[in-house]
Amino acid sequence: MPTNLPAEAKSKWKKAMDAKTPEEKLQALQEFLSAVPKHKGTERLRMQVTRQIAALRREIELKRKKKVGGGEQFFVEKEGDIQVVVLGYPGPGREAVFRCITGIEVTDSKKPVPGMKTWEGVYFQIISAPPLFGDASSQSRLMALARNADAIILALDMVPGVESQVKALLDALEESRIAWKKPRASVEIERRSTGGVVVIGELEGTTLQDVAALLRDYGIYHAVVKVTGKATLDDVEEALFGEIAYKPTIVVLYSPGDHIQDAEVMRGTLESEFGIPVHLIKGCETIDFGRMAEYIFRELDLIRVYTRNPRTGEVEERPIVVRRGAKVIEVARIIHSQLGESFKYAWVWSNRFTFNPRKVGKDFELGDGDIIQIAGG
């Protein structure tokens, strides 16, 4: 997937990639879909393109409504350090999970409702999404909300058929090119006007020449292919149809009655089948957000860096949250752009050191819990 597409389909996909407006892209995708043969090997691709078409139609319709003063606001601006969206079907479970985490009661379930929760100084913005219905319009909006977030909680009532509900939600994420388990490899293709095809990263079972030949089939002659992990030729081709976004995903089963034993059995079944964490709650006193937050933080490969005031020696309680591997100069720029420009050196306190503090340069790699004090010009 996607493999053995006819040349006509590949040329039509190039037209879709080159489209400048939503209207042009919609037309190009419809033409591409008509050129994709229908068989088992193209089922997922056809479903993904169909969802893209539905999302574009909605985008065009919303723009039209806004021009005449209508339309609705569905996007939620990110605040805090990590944004988590809570998805689920109609029922008390979705709203109960959001209420137990944030303390906010949802009064309007037709639009996203934001809340905030802290864990060890890290601010989690929790978004209660509207319930998922069967129509494509509802699903495309919610999947866009999920794709914009950093992580996902699937909140479901412990009812007969909950296993199929979990599978349906995970399938919907996958069809929207959202990975709910960390992928073996990720590929980003950056098109350029010159320079041929360059691969940054590691390939598996294929060569640079194979990648260049594949891209030429789609009318791409100059590009930088950035690989994280080890990518196969299929991984590169997948990336042509849109980058797959990894979002750590947790299932929360809401079981307020006396069915907790059944819920325990279901938790084991779901964890075994899908390989993702499943939490059980009966009420707010049983929810363990700390465990959820720790899992999300670890899966996103983040660290906390604390800043020290050079005048008072006080350490800020709220950390700066950055990707693992971040360097001192990156944190300096986050604190203030001028601090990055005038940077001379930094003092770092870390439990990795035998003696603290240590004087370091701009390329020193920080670790979780490190304290930094920067000296500028």
Image (cartoon, rainbow, N blue to C red):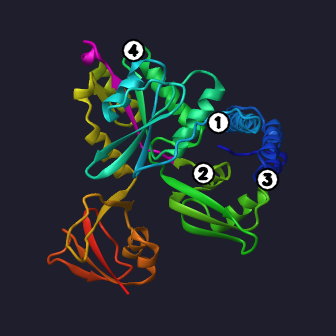
Question: Which residue is disc 1 drawn over?
Answer: 44
Instruction: Please rate how many residues cluster around mark 4, counting C-alpha atoms within 10 Å: few if below 14, some from 14 to 19, many from 20.
Output: some
The amino acid beneath tag 3 is: Lys
Residue 278: name its quadrant. top left
Which residue is pictured at 42% across the width and 84% down the height?
342
Q: Quadrant of the N terminus?
A: top right
364 is higher (above) or lower (below) than 121: below
Magenta-tinted stretch: 246-262
Left or right: where 98 falls relative to 225: left
Q: Tell me the CA gap for discs 2 and 4.
A: 35 Å
Contact, mark 2 vs mark 4 (Cβ under 8 Å): no
Mark number, residue 20: 3
Instruction: Please rate how many residues cluster around mark 2, counting C-alpha atoms within 10 Å: few if below 14, some from 14 to 19, many from 20.
Output: some
Contact, mark 3 vs mark 4 (Cβ under 8 Å): no
Mark number, residue 243: 2
Outermost residue on the front side: it is 69
Q: Secondary structure at mark 4?
A: loop
Left or right: where 174 falls relative to 358: right
N-term-proximal mark, 2 vs 4: 4
Residue 282, image x and y in percent? 27, 21
